[in-house]
Image (spheres, rainbow, N blue to C red):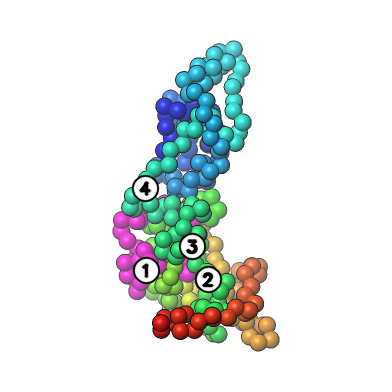
Amino acid sequence: MIINKDKCVGCANCVPVCSVGAIFIGADGLAEINRDTCVECHNCHRSLSPEHLPPGLTRLIRRILKSVSLRFQPDPDVCPTDAFAPEDLEWPRIVRRAFSDPMVTHESTGVHGRGTEEVKTNDVSGRIKHGEVGLVVEFGRPGIGTYFRDVEEVTTALAKEKITFEAGNPVTQLMTDKTTGQIREDLLDEKVLSCIVEVTVKLEDTAAILGSLKQMSKTVKTVISIGASTVCDKDGSDPLRDILQNEGFGIGWAKVNLGLGRVANRYVSAGEA
């Protein structure tokens, strides 16, 4: 995202709407974007309705009013001169928008968002099976963001444990080596609003993995949120609850799959046709 300084009048309406605090008023009194901090979420462009006041005249009026201790301030939800200019992003910066802008389709999954369907379609996909636990590790949420260098710090540590990275996950597809958890070097300095790492572990290994994640969360330079899912027994019970409680994690049921889904074409779903 770019702010056209020929149009900007320095009203500062855009400063508080930035998801990661990347917009500021510079020494010239006009808005600027910290390119390193910006995650290309386009929240500024979406949140402020564009108006088309003449920039030169608007600046003049603001200066005159300021001289007599008055102020011309546009409504807080508008950019009075339509100063935002979305740019055509190239690799690797385009990855920022793919993970940060909920309005664009992620090319690796074909859907909006940073992750996959996880357990929401487990009745059809069968991704998580009895005796397994699906763990999601979310970085940077809310409103902090994360660099892929921080993500790699965790994925390389996880790769040494008894886990399997979810092949369809967007972060997994950025790895150069799934056995080591290393991420493409040209992406390590790219910042995104948030991203999700998905792994599958055996039920008996879950406590050890959760303990490792708790230790990693103390050193990584962002916020980590952890989600866990499993397949319940026929009576509705699940052993994961006790594991989470013993490891000191609060339990809040969020996404519950009722098992009502059915595979429409088993051959296609299994990749046999």
- The answer for how far apart the CA atoms under marks 3 and 2 are is 13 Å
Name the N-terminal-most of marks 4 and 2.
4
Disc number placed over residue 111 in the picture, else none: 3
Mark closer to the observer (3, 2)? 3
Q: Earlier in the sequence, mark 3 or mark 1?
A: 3
Return the residue nearer the eye: 170 or 163: 170
What is the quadrant of the C terminus in the image?
A: bottom left
Q: Is residue 99 visible?
A: no
Across and down, in percent, residue 126 comes to 52, 80
Alpha carbons under labels 4 and 2: distance apart: 29 Å
Where residue 211 sits in the image (x, y, percent)? Answer: 51, 71
Q: Are marks 1 and 2 in contact (CB under 8 Å)?
A: no
**Type of residue at label 4?**
Leu
Q: Amino acid at mark 2?
A: Glu
Q: Amino acid at mark 3?
A: Val
Q: Tell me whether the residue at label 4 lies in contact with that at label 3, contact meaning CB atoms closer than 8 angstroms.
A: no
Compared across the picture, whether 92 is left or right of 134 comes to left
Q: Check disc 1 and give the amino acid type.
A: Gly
Q: Which residue is depicted at the point 52% across and 69% down?
A: 117
Q: Which mark is residue 89?
A: 4
Q: CA distance from mark 3 to mark 1?
A: 24 Å
| Range of magenta residues | 172-198
Q: Residue at point 40% right, 57% down?
A: 148
Residue 139 in percent (x, y) is at 49, 59
Report the Cα–Cα distance between label 1 and label 2.
20 Å
Residue 83 lies, with reference to residue 214, above or below; the image says above
Q: In the image shown, does 47 or 54 lie closer to the viewer?
A: 54
Mark 1 or 4, nearer chain start: 4
